Amino acid sequence: MLHTNPFDDDKLREECGIFGMYGTPDAAANTVLGLHALQHRGQEAAGIVTFHEGRFNSHRALGHVAPNFSSEKVIRELPGLTAIGHVRYSTSGATLLRNVQPIYADLEGGGIALAHNGNLTNARQIRDDLVAKGSIFQSTMDTEVITHLVALSRKGTVVERIVDALKQIEGAYALVCLTPKKLIGVRDPWGVRPLVLGTLKGAPILASETCALDIMGAEYVRDVEPGELIVIDADGIHSHHPFPPVKRRFCIFEYIYFARPDSQVEGLSVYESRKRIGAELARENHVDADVVIPVPDSGVPAAIGYAAESGIPFELGIIRNHYVGRTFIEPTDQIRHLGVKLKHNANRAYIQGKRVILVDDSIVRGTTSTKIVEMVREAGAKEVHMRIASPPTTHSCFYGVDTPERSKLLAATHSVEEMTKFIKADSLAFLTMDGLYRAMGRKGREPGNPAYCDACFSGDYPIGLTDEADRNARGPRQLTLLAETG
């Protein structure tokens, strides 16, 4: 589950964004807009499927949304009043066109297209059972497991067959599905991954984040509830709750990093949440300094909150170059050594001779933090104090986030004192778990009953990890891991 991008290999990455729209002649064009707004959730591939006059139409491509979906020709090839779309960030190995979503399957009684954000934690077990019984898989995505289970279900309606399939899987998921007559959206019972319902001039929309609604002037209606299945058809919007209720465990890292700052997630402003996180960080970990500087772009809101709470001036002491992409230059050893400097440059006038507080959202492997601290020192800082707007990331995520294996996580193998020496900072401090929960409006983290999924910090996994347990029991060399879809 390791990154292959040498310029950006020290960040956790949300793996996918999904979008669906029903009942408008501009369904495909609006889906392009929605996916463009969700580009931060997946930057390696994109796809759209529509339905028109008895036929499913598909366009899938590697790369960003804009260069692949901006032509009139592509939009003309995606007719129909209903569409679903997907953006993907790969995890293991190369991104292949066969792994680009939405995926489509012909089933008894009609076809279905499906797009998935999340990760199924028993997909390998189910896949092996299906293959042993004769099923043929065309991709390495766990999403394809769902379509096989739907195809094999003996239930009556397509909705009943989807529910039957989902009752056999474990893991985190938000799905949008397209059938000849329906647009369907569903979240897993724990609600780990986000999904919202909106409307544009009466046309219902499903999307991973509210920023996808804003881009087209659509109205936010509400969040899809954990365990809720929404069916949209000619008769309107229908809500179903087919799964037994469990404790809600939304991914807290959406607030720290994944979601766009201008989104509203589970009723909370992401931007305001990050500022509150920064304020808590300042209250918990004050240090005398001359300037607060964010590590752009993800550290900016937290740094604003830290500066406001501490009274220390905020400055953009590091400027990010937004035009360095995956294919910017061949990743030779020399280019890898340049690393952070290709994407960040010190704003020397606001650093030289000053005691600097650097604010970032997280430390994963620590390589980026080391290079950022070195760059700030080279720009003349007297002191460099690193402050992290989350608890230490000590565990891998198995619910749809691209995470290194645990042995590669710096906080899993080093104490804070050792990490401070590793990144060569004068001091290093993380937000406490209780501080994070206070920033989210809670009194603190309730042991044994946390309000969020915080497994990457706590190791408290709310959903079973069947495939991981099997991998550990049998040994990693005996399993070919699926490329998680996001």
Image (cartoon, rainbow, N blue to C red):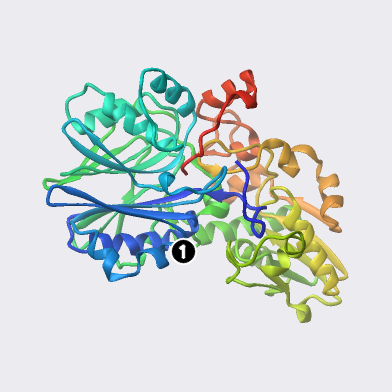
Q: Quadrant of residue 437?
A: top right
Is residue 380 visible to the viewer in this orientation of the structure? yes
In this rendering, is residue 180 above or below 26? above
In this rendering, is residue 144 above or below 72? above
The amino acid on which the numbered mark 1 sits, given as a three-letter code, is: Asp
**Residue closer to the observer: 425 or 367:** 367
Residue hosting label 1: 262
Circle 1: element type: loop
In this rendering, is residue 139 above or below 290? above
Look at 50% across and 51% down and name the residue there. Answer: 89
Across and down, in percent, residue 149 comes to 32, 27
In this rendering, is residue 108 above or below 56? above
For disc 1, the neighbor class at 10 Å (few under 14, some 14 to 19, many from 20) is: some
Across and down, in percent, residue 228 comes to 31, 37
**Residue closer to the observer: 384 or 471:** 471
Look at 86% across and 74% down and name the residue there. Answer: 380
Is residue 206 visible to the viewer in this orientation of the structure? no
